[in-house]
Amino acid sequence: MNESESLPELHEWLARVCTQNNLTYEIIFIDDGSTDDSWKVISSLRDKDPNTKGIRFRRNYGKSAALNVGFAAAEGDVVITMDADLQDSPDEIPALYKKIMDERYDLVSGWKKKRYDNALTKNIPSKLFNFATQSMSGIKLHDFNCGLKAYRKEVVKSIEVYGEMHRYIPVIAKWAGFKKIGEQVVEHRARKYGTTKFGLERFVNGFLDLLTIFFMGKFGKRPMHFFGVMGTLSFLLGFFATLWLIYEKVFLYTEFSRTLVQKPSFYIALTMLIIGVILFIAGFLGELVSRNGGDRNAYNIAQRVGWE
């Protein structure tokens, strides 16, 4: 988005690296609703170089949508993604390509070990984010959100990236069955043109997306295991509390029981019963949706990604 100044230099650099390393290639630029001359530049580059393609969004949809569309359009055996701001170096492409083709990795994520970002607004929050994601996913990566990544073709054709899930592509790939995920130290360069397109809202969105991806990975195919357990516990606690209140009202008939409906315990027990029933129904509806999903059956998955 709005990277018209960097695009010609990026294109020349990409083409030079691929040609020097005898790589057949295609370059796909995704214009994410730019308001500058980015699309004119892309069109010019496409006219000059038959290996260049362009996809234009009518408005800004975000990085996840851009990656998802790019994944669908990509034809190569190895797909490498990077931002257009020249902070990612195309010189990293040959090493990333070899890790996929020669070392048989499914996904290789870049690790910007030395960064040129603001420590307070980017570096420190990034470290906290990476630590939380690593702990929840079990994937040992230092930089989940690095835009410079390499993928085997089967990976990008088997996953869907939406919302702001681009931060968790290694996690999505793992839960899609791709186990060999690694990383490589890559160069991080200072921004040469323009300004960053990400604001502080990415921290809140990132945390919420982390909870979503964790829940979907753990319970996406068996929602009753989450909602059913929580609902059953809530219902049983409310049920036994209600039994005790009835026993106290009928048999003990204390001062407390005479004013039962005025006590907080009565409403707590009632609320727990209602919440338990609602959670159980949510789990049941989730199971119905999940059972009608295309990925529920192993045969459907094999049909989509191919037998091996």
Image (cartoon, rainbow, N blue to C red):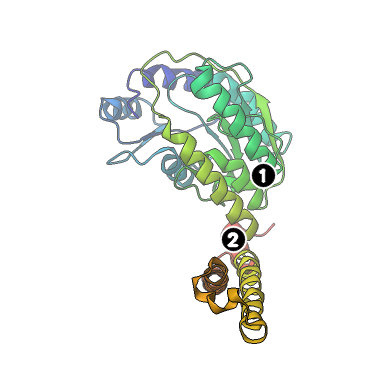
**Depth order, front residue of 201/266:** 266
On the image, the x and y values in percent for residue 91 come to: 57, 18
Among numbered discs 2 and 1, the one appearing first in the sequence: 1
Q: Quadrant of residue 250?
A: bottom right
Q: How many marks?
A: 2
Question: On screen, 128 above or below 276?
Answer: above
Residue labelled with disc 1: 136
Q: Amino acid at mark 2?
A: Gly
Q: CA distance from mark 2 to mark 1?
A: 15 Å
On the image, the x and y values in percent for residue 133 come to: 63, 39
Q: Quadrant of residue 226?
A: bottom right
Q: Which residue occupies 62% across, 54% down?
A: 217
Q: Amino acid at mark 1?
A: Met
On the image, the x and y values in percent for residue 85 come to: 43, 21
Q: Residues within 10 Å of mark 1 (few under 14, many from 20)?
A: some
- The image's mark for residue 220 is 2
**Depth order, front residue of 244/276:** 244
Furthest residue toward right: 103
Q: Secondary structure at mark 1?
A: helix
Q: Secondary structure at mark 2?
A: loop
Which corner quadrant holds the N terminus? top left
Q: Which residue occupies 71% across, 36% down?
A: 140
